[in-house]
Image: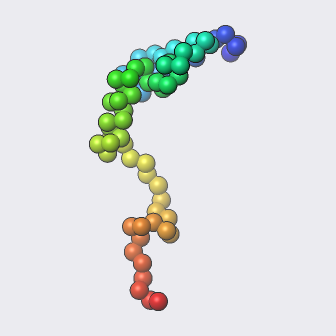
Amino acid sequence: MGLHSVMKNRCPICKKTVKVSPKKQPEEVKLLPFCSQRCKLIDLGAWLDGKYKVLSEPSDTSPDTPTSDKE
């Protein structure tokens, strides 16, 4: 890709193609990877409603890990 090529990706919410020109407009960059403020808010709402989860292995210092009273 050259310096003057347009970056393209798909909005994860509506699947619309998002193009960002080399003369990046500040609003275009703030919305990435979304195509609009609406899609960005839909995604935020999904996180807040618990529809997305980040799965990981429990660690030894997890607050949910039961501790023994052997001390």
| Location of residue 13 by image quarter | top left
Look at the image and name its color scheme. rainbow
Question: Is residue 66 placed above or below 41 in the rendered structure?
Answer: below
Task: Identify which residue is drawn at 43% across, 51% down.
Answer: 55
Q: Position of residue 2 (x, y in %)?
A: 70, 13
Q: Position of residue 65 (x, y in %)?
A: 41, 70
The answer to whether residue 40 is seen in the rendering is yes
The answer to whether residue 8 is seen in the rendering is no
Q: Position of residue 6 (x, y in %)?
A: 59, 12
| Location of residue 66 by image quarter | bottom left
Q: Residue furthest front?
A: 26
Q: Would residue 7 appear left or right of 34 to someone viewing this image?
A: right
Question: Is residue 49 placed above or below 27 in the rendered structure?
Answer: below
Task: Identify which residue is drawn at 47% across, 89% down.
Answer: 71
Q: Would residue 11 appear left or right of 51 to someone viewing this image?
A: right
Task: Identify which residue is drawn at 36% across, 33% down.
Answer: 43
